[in-house]
Amino acid sequence: MIETFYETLRRQGITRRSFLKFCSLTATSLGLGSAFAPRIAHALETKPRTPVIWLHGLECTCCSESFIRSAHPLAKDVVLSMLSLDYDDTLMAAAGHQAEAILEEIKKKYKGQYILAVEGNPPLNEGGMYCIQSGKPFVEKLKYMAADAKAIISWGSCASWGCVQAAKPNPTQAVPVHKVITDKPIIKVPGCPPIAEVMTGVVTYMLTFDRIPELDRQGRPKMFYGQRIHDKCYRRPHFDAGQFVEEWDDDAARRGYCLYKMGCKGPTTYNACSTTRWNGGVSFPIASGHGCIGCSEEGFWDKGGFYDRLTHIKQFGVEANADKVGGTAAAVAGAAVAAHAAVSAIKRARVNHAEENQGGK
Amino acid sequence: MGVYETQGFKLDNSGKRVVVDPVCRIEGHLRVEVNLDANNVIRNAVSTGTMWRGLEVILKGRDPRDAWAFTERICGVCTGTHALTSVRAVEDALAIKIPENANTIRNMMQLTLQVHDHLVHFYHLHALDWVDVVSALKADPKRTSELAQSISAWPLSSPGYFRDLQNRLKKFVESGQLGPFMNGYWGNPAYKLPPEANLMAVAHYLEALDFQKEIVKIHTIFGGKNPHPNWLVGGMPCAINVHDTGAVGAINMERLNLVKSIIDRSIEFTEQVYIPDLLAIASFYKGWLHGGGLSSKSVLSYGDIPDRANDYSAKNLLLPRGAIINGDLTRVHEVDLKDPEQIQEFVTHSWYKYADEARGLHPFDGVTEPNFALGKNAKGTKTDIKELDEAAKYSWIKAPRWRGHAMEVGPLARYIIGYVQKNPEFKEPVDMVLKKLDVPLSALFSTLGRTAARGLECQWAAHKLAYFHDKLIANIKAGDSSTANIEKWDPATWPKEVKGAGFTEAPRGALAHWIRIKDGRIDNYQCVVPTTWNGSPRDGKGQIGAFEASLMNTPMAKADEPLEILRTIHSFDPCLACSTHVMSPDGQEMAVVKVR
Amino acid sequence: MSLARDSSSYHDMATATGVDEAAVQQAPSIKSMYVYEAPVRLWHWVNALCIVTLAASGYLIGSPLPSMPGEASDSFLFGYIRFAHFAAAYILAVGFLVRIYWGFAGNSHAREIFTLPLLTAAYWREVGAMLQWYAFLRPYPNRYVGHNPLARLAMFFGVFLMTLFMLATGFALYGEGAQAGHWSHILFTSWVIPLFGQSQDVHTWHHLGMWAIVLFVIFHVYAAIREDIMGRQSMLSTMISGYRMLKK
């Protein structure tokens, strides 16, 4: 089961020739000159698997569950051949102080070398004691392990944005990872949960290319979060045709029309669901008849009902959507204008009348 | 607190204190502290829920039709079960009747979860409590093959298969990078399996990891994704279209065939791998019958899997419903979620405040006011706890009681109730296992019994999946393709103020949500979840919860290696993200959320 | 209005407030003045047409018409509605750019909608005067050749800033579909979406912006008609002919 990085590449069908080429390119790009290529090759041939510390804050473990659903590569191969999952409370054999000892060991032995994967987020209220681990606030553990990490992966919407426990009024003051760790590269892989193959895709990208994937402005890998679900939705032709499901289980629903009117958030949600699909490509929410709820978007819990097309706005005191706010304002304005016009007309009539009277004198 | 007796247990906290924090291989965050006597036998047990998220406060004022999505995020391991409970609660409040197909599909979703969750629990969360991975290196592949072939017809059982696996395992261990097996309790004398059984179990650990992702595809087909599939108040969102044009956008024959193939493979894996492994492992541990706890005294099940739609009475539920108290197995009490005298929650030892803490509160009237403080005998500080003081408040989990009794919930509770009700679907498999292992009925009330009941239920659920698949097809054949009732979809059709309760049997046990709806919005939302029952701290009368009771009187092979504690706690399949209560920052909101 | 000023300060005054007593003095001899040059007038009416198209199509994008029957290939209704929205938006954007150019190239009145003499007390005094006129507190308004000071305030916010806002949010949303690399994605999507947090919020604000423009249009049309009837200068015809007729 233990394989070096080289063996993993070979098993994935990469030839030795390509491998050596990769090494010399790496050497050149690092400005080391081609003489260093054999050294890099040697390092990769013998390099240990990258240690991963997987921490859990306030969460529901859906990200871990999703991760083990990966069909390609199999979660088994990721965990046993590609990286070294040295700490993950959900899977690890050890518990208590034996478990916590691993953190110390990895932190020292692989200083600056390990990847910190975070599922869930730290709450800050009550001294952080809404999430206690080993008798201490989770946020301390997070900061402690982040200090010597090479990079951080924020798994899922909890770690990336805050997700459900951070929905209004966020009673525990749960915050995403980047609010407490500001000095490390953070890769956000949002979704509730993220797609399994996207999770393993990000990890294998980092191991294969030995670099962090290109991120968008919000810190998400462009390769999986660069497009909206809507952009690649197979029901898109129905959208363009103006063919919509109007009610659950109506004829249009049975024909697979667009779910836009049922509140589908596909047009505003950046994720790979409509291309990668879920669970080995079996389906994705829209293909199974329910609109997208936008679970990979920041604050998606607080954008009004999941079945509303137009977002409810709460800033104006009463909860209403843009049409209600705007329509009401326009109606009030129209009424005001009419009233103003009426008063103007009366005034004008009076003035004219007075002038006529004056003229009569 | 010293020494006292409760529920037939003698608690004594005078011995050496052992702290296990975190308890790994569970959902969420749990801490356990025990006191050992001079012979390393557990004489006092304290379990503490150490996380909470506040979903209930968050739900207030939202659209009840959205509640399923919020509550589903209570737990991603038992994914979907909270969503189902939530839509049932809303439908109960609004008197919405769902179509027959929707009920059938929901049952299939719930049964899929049972199969998946039990399988993953056994192999990936629980097996390492029984299986010594390092010992597998010493196994003889040929004898492993013989063992495997003697207990099952499963094809992956040749000597070469086990030899390859063993070689990979050897290289893995020799690399020094043990990954998730690092710092395990390998070599602990509490491990009883011969090397061959260990090697076989490791092989199946990996096979199960590959296979579990197939089971959940049933969720993906009907709910669009897993974890966290989609649901709908009033039915299911997946339309059925098997005859007509456009069928590719709906549940059609190909989808139904895919479901069928997954069901067939699930039955096969359960019967050829899971159950044989379970029996093989159990046969080596049948001398270790600790961990019964409350199971022989008080167990509770709400029942689930309504055969026909919209009938939630006990006779229509395929999973048994009822309560047993005081160890009286001759009487199964009726359970009513809305009776204020039955289910009540206490906070004497929980980090909450009630005006009168001698009284319990029914979930419809739940109050959650935080009161985080450590007892005077606790060691450490408020943000660096070394030892808790169980004489004071010590957990974020409340203490739910059924007519004043601490209860155990879960597969074992369901099987005990089904057994005493003489339901052959539950009695016969239990008798079969007892006979095969050659142990008396009393052996059922143990850690091993809990683990066995889960395996049997996995098998039961896999077969029930096939039953509902046939039922779905028969109903479509009879001309009914309806999946949703939209009569009351529009909130304008709702009464001004209503309340309701919904329940399921989650893989871990009895789960219920209580909702109050006012002016089309959630006025109050409460969940009492399985791990709140099982992980309950003490109450005002000093009664201990199911986790705590199960640890009592268990001898530990090594005081420093909590293998036996993990084994018994894991047998409940704890889910701590669920059992947490909710609070508001200002302490004004009177609310509770627990999530299982 | 004091006339005891030297001519240069008087000119500044006219620029700030639009009060043009000098012109009015000559009113008997010049019955009208050329105010809105041809490009301004053309822009005004093209812009009006675009806004009507954008508002109507935008509303239908948010609240679509009842579902079309048949297969997807049978219809492209929603696509056409969206096309109308995008085409009108492009025309509006180009018109806006031309209009900005004309702010530099045209006469002084062509600049009025892009700037506000915020620090000029006289300007605010005249805004107050207009408010009094609308509140029926004075029998007659002052006479202005270009936009009256209140109208100028409304134009600056309701036309200039709102158009900027709608173009930025609108093209940010357009760029989402046009994909990374498209000019609209580079210029707008890349920063507008993160600024608002997520796409859905941008949709909501863009939608609210439409209603803000509807409000502007209601007041604008009413004020123009009313001034035409009750004020001391022509309005509607001015935007057609370009000539402001001054009344006594």
Image (spheres, coloured by chain):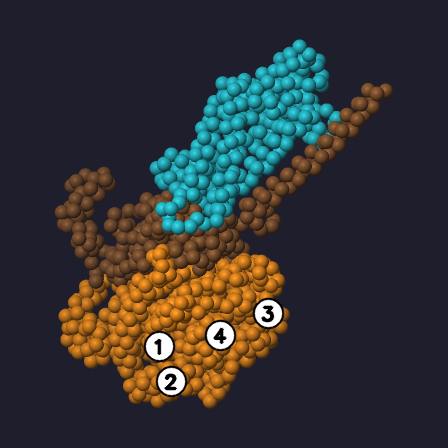
Residue A133 position by quadrant: bottom left
Give percent across and percent down for residue B123. Answer: 31, 71
Alpha carbons under labels 3 and 4: distance apart: 26 Å
Tell me what hue chain A is rendered in: brown
Of residues B500 and A208, the one nearer the viewer is B500
- Residue type, mark 4 in image: Asp
Alpha carbons under labels 1 and 4: distance apart: 21 Å
Q: Secondary structure at mark 4?
A: loop
| Contact? badges 3 and 1 (CB < 8 Å) | no
Q: Residues within 10 Å of mark 1 (few under 14, many from 20)?
A: some
Residue B285 position by quadrant: bottom left
Q: Residues within 10 Å of mark 4 (few under 14, many from 20)?
A: few
State the residue position of label 3: B365
- Mark 1 and mark 4 lie on one chain; the one further toward the N terminus is 4
Q: Nearer the viewer, mark 1 or mark 4?
A: 4
Alpha carbons under labels 2 and 4: distance apart: 22 Å
Give me the chain that's cyan: C
